[in-house]
Image (cartoon, grey):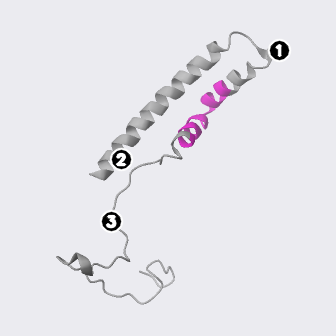
Amino acid sequence: CCEWLRCCGGGEPRPRTVWLGHPEKRDQRYPRNVINNQKYNFFTFLPGVLFNQFKYFFNLYFLLLACSQFVPEMRLGALYTYWVPLGFVLAVTIIREAVEEIRCYVRDKE
């Protein structure tokens, strides 16, 4: 590694000793070698999916149009004609993302 990056601990490079067959002598300072393909965790799943959906113009447009129907002067029809299609699209997207995340979680555990 380069000295100016200091990504390897900032000191002189030292050899790493790998102990085979002696788990008690294993050095715990090094991180485990794991692969994580998940995009979300438990707390960021719903906000992340909703953010990714509403960053597209038409999804945001239909959300604003549905919210405008709460104002009586702007109401054009029944509320369910705006909220049911938007809710259906969001529900399908959330279910699809959840299935994909579960598959990534299972694959990562293997």
Label drawn at residue 105? 2
The residues tagged by marks 3 and 1 sit, at their Cα atoms, a distance apart of 60 Å
Circle 1 is placed at which residue position?
73
Q: Is residue 1 above or below residue 71?
A: below
Circle 3 is placed at which residue position?
33
The image quadrant that residue 76 belongs to is top right
Q: Residue at x 44, y 36 (%)?
A: 97
Predominant SS along the magenta part? helix
73 sits left or right of 44 in the view: right
Disc number lying in front (1 or 2): 2
- Tag 3: amino acid: Asn
Q: Is residue 97 above or below residue 74?
A: below
> Earlier along the polypeptide chain: callout 1 or callout 2?
1
Q: Residue at x 58, y 23 (%)?
A: 86
The residues tagged by marks 3 and 2 sit, at their Cα atoms, a distance apart of 16 Å
Residue at the outermost bottom position: 12
Label 2 element class: helix
> Earlier along the polypeptide chain: callout 3 or callout 2?
3
Residue at the outermost left position: 21
- Tag 2: amino acid: Tyr
- Is residue 41 one of those drawn in magenta? no
Q: Residue at x 48, y 46 (%)?
A: 42
Which contiguous range is marked in magenta? 47-63
